[in-house]
Structures are given as C-alpha cells and as structure tokens.
Image: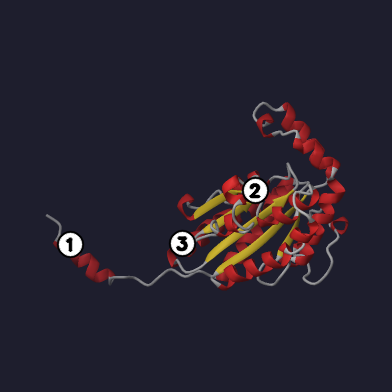
Amino acid sequence: MDVITQFRAQAGKKVRLADWDPDETLGMDRADAEARLQDNAQAIGKLQHRLFAEGKRSLLVVLQAMDAAGKDSTVRHVLRDVNPQGVLVTSFKKPTSHELAHDFLWRIHRRTPRKGHIRVFNRSQYEDVLVVRVENIVPEEVWEKRYQAINDFERTISESGTRIIKIYLNISKDRQREKLMRRLTDPDRAWKFDASDFKKREQWPAYMEAYEDAITRCNTDEAPWFIVPTNKKWFRLYVISQIIRDALEEMDPQLPPLKIDPAVAMRLLEDGVD
C-alpha cells in the first residue's frame, strides 16, 4: 500500500479539506494496522540508530491539528522504540515576551534538529499563519507575507541536510467533540482542557480555511504536506508511522566506518587481560 501517494497533498493544487475523509481506513482492519504499526515502530528505531550514528543529516516531523486530534499520542506510539537521546519533541505554545522581541521564525529556527537527530514539532511555524490569522493577532498585511518566509526557511534547512515531513491530523468536528467530552470527564485528561477550546470550535470554518491556505501555499517538494485521516486512532498511528519510516528508508542513513580494525582491537584487549 503506497501511503505516500494516498495521503500526500498534491503540490500546486488548491487543498480543500472537505475532499479528505477523516474516517478513511483504505479498507484496513484494526488488527492489521496495529501489527503494521508495531513493525514500523521497530524499523524506525533501527533507522534512527543509524541516523544518529551517521551524524550528517536530520529529520524534522511537523504535527499540526485542531485540539484533541492526537498529536501527543502520535509521538508516544510511533516513536516508542527510538533512543530518547536521539529524538526531541518541542511544543510551541503562546510566544513569550522574549520570543516576541524577535522575528516570528526565531524561536522555530533555534529548535530545528541537529545533525543525527529527529525533532518533532508539536505545533510549529504554522501557528503564525493559523492562530494569528483567525484570532486577528496581527493584521493581514503581516501574516500574508509569512507563507513565503516559511517556504524560504524550510528550503534553507532542507538544503542544510534536514528532511522535512509535515502532517495535518485531519479530525472531524464531531469526532473532536467526542474526544473533548471524554477529556473533560476523565480525571487523567481533564487538565488538558482549556476554555479556548470552545472558542476554536466556534471558529472551525475559519480555521479550516486557514489550514487549507497554509497547506496549499507551503506544500513543496522539499517540505511536503500529508493529510492523515484521524477519526480512527489505530489508522492514524499506522499511516504516520509509515510516512516516517518511508522517509527514513529513503534517506538510508549509513553507519560510519570502523575507527579501528577489529583484529587489532581484539589483540589490544587480550594484551590488557591480567
């Protein structure tokens, strides 16, 4: 199954999220998807080891979505077999006063992955053409210029050796309501609930329009967008794991050459035995 083809947004074509079914499963059943997820997670762990050892390139995974779409659980499940020292997750909240004293990409650029690492952005530079647009935080003449700035930024880090994957977790408004209700009534999850969640639901059409523009205008060969069906958690996890695995396999990181002949090392070790 070619997940890349099924869920990659076509560059140069206007994205209309209504055309993307959040309930899509491609006819797959849950047991099969979970088995594939386990296999992919193990493969990602091995590929991340090689990427870290190679130390020449990096991978950036951008996760964007409406609230309760499952960004946190995606990180937990898909990257469960990686070495923590080679993976970092950054969650971009409301900018601090210090961050606002710089250009909008300053806080983003300083958290891009170092060579050999995987970095996950839980929300990202796209907040500055989503939230700031819908909430009228800055005027249109300001946020309108940011699409090109984001494209230039992504091209720059791509040319420096960072592979970029951008994933929109496509959840329906009804499914989001179910998850928010469950969150509100679950003591282990209620802390995540925020009054702003209600306001964003009221602004759903405006956010969908903003997402469509962001995906359409910032969808390039070096930084493609994937629109992943999210209503079924088990399918969402499988698809995202496949996208990440495919990207790492295409990168094909190589272990560095040995720094010492194993035979020489064995002799040195044997000579040191008391």
From the image, tell me which residue sits under label 1: 270
Q: Which residue is drawn at 59% across and 50% down?
A: 99
Is 247 located above or below residue 77 in the figure?
A: below
The residue lying furthest to the left in this view is: 274
Residue 24 image offset from top left, x and y in percent: 81, 53
Q: Given the image, on which type of amino acid does mark 1 rest?
A: Glu
Q: Which of marks 3 and 1 is in front?
A: 3
Using a 10 Å C-alpha cutoff, classify the residue at mark 2 as few (fewer than 14 neighbours), some (14 to 19) or many (20 or more). Answer: some
Element carrying mark 2: helix
Label 1 vs 2, first from the N-terminus: 2
Residue 170 image offset from top left, x and y in percent: 78, 52
From the image, tell me which residue sits under label 3: 52
Label 3 vs 1, first from the N-terminus: 3
Residue 258 image offset from top left, x and y in percent: 34, 70
From the image, tell me which residue sits under label 2: 74
> Cα distance, mark 3 to mark 2?
21 Å
Contact, mark 3 vs mark 1 (Cβ under 8 Å): no
Image quadrant containing the N terminus: bottom right
